[in-house]
Image (cartoon, rainbow, N blue to C red):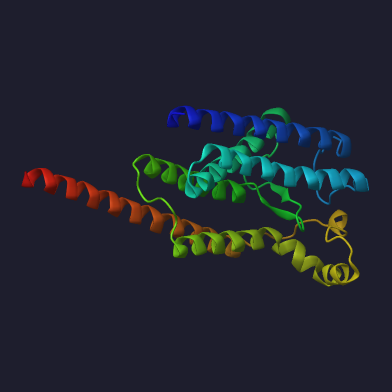
Amino acid sequence: MKIKNLLFWVTFYSIAMGFLESAVVIYLRQLLYPGPDGFTFPLRPMHHNLALVEVSREAATIVMLMAIGAVAGKSKAEKFAWFLYSFAIWDIFYYVFLYVFLGWPQNLMTWDILFLIPVPWVGPVLSPVIIDIVMILFALTIVRYSIKKSQVALRLSETLMLLTGGFIVVCSFTYDYVVQYWPQLYRQISGGRSLLSEMYNYSPAWFNWYLFSFGALIMIFSYITYLRRLSLFEATQHAEVREHYNYY
């Protein structure tokens, strides 16, 4: 499949997934937050079975996005790129559709619960959108240079920077919940209970922008390092070709 067609279908699929995700959340909010105020913290209790389905649905969503990468890409780097791209497009359009149908979020600083595994991830909507943009840039760069037959595989140092930055960003999303409930979390782990046991008492107090910014900057530096290496490689290749033709 030509790259333009592939880009179109992956984008189209990811937008459709974003709509499906927003539709599920709209149904949940109608059931759990039917009042005029809509979604607010603390979260309202779900039936155990419904909570299990919700966590499983989130895990299934990641599997679906990974499958897109596996099908669309040829090399490992391309598979990774298409996963990043589809994840970011899905996440951005999830918020777009929520805004279209619910008028929510009111702005980019509105708090949202981002994920539930293994503990709630929370943060202003702006924070995942920033990471989505970095992911799109990384993905499109890999795809662009793979078309030119460049060596697009990430080096170990670039991979470690990307993973480290991503881990720190995740820590920033879970920081507030863990800080508020760390004694209970320890007892839950030692007692074999769910780490989500305190979720229905939780209201976010503070987002750690310092930790988030540190992680995001490491991810951005990983991208800049990767882009610079590929740009230099491309420039060297062009110089060698020109020198070859000048010689003859």
| Residue 102 can be seen in this image | yes
Whole-percent x and y of residue 14? Answer: 60, 34
Relative to 90, 226 lies left or right: left
Name the image quarter holding residue 199.
bottom right
Whole-percent x and y of residue 140? Answer: 45, 42
Please state which of residues 98 and 41 is positioned toward the viewer in this rendering. Answer: 98
Relative to 24, 76 lies left or right: left
Note whether 240 is above or below 218 in the view shown. above
Position of the C terminus by quadrant: top left
Relative to 57, 69 lies left or right: left
Please state which of residues 63 and 22 is positioned toward the viewer in this rendering. Answer: 63
Q: What residue is drawn where x is 42% and y is 45%?
A: 141
Relative to 237, 127 lies left or right: right
Q: What residue is drawn where x is 54% and y is 28%?
A: 9
Residue found farthest to the right = 47
Please state which of residues 180 and 62 is positioned toward the viewer in this rendering. Answer: 62
Tally of numbered tags: 0
Note whether 187 is above or below 121 in the view shown. below
Q: What residue is drawn where x is 87% and y is 54%?
A: 200
Whole-percent x and y of residue 98? Answer: 69, 34
| Residue 40 can be seen in this image | no
Q: What residue is drawn where x is 70% and y is 37%?
A: 104
Note whether 198 is above or below 152 in the view shown. below
Whole-percent x and y of residue 75? Answer: 48, 46
Name the image quarter holding residue 171.
bottom right
Note whether 221 is above or below 231 in the view shown. below
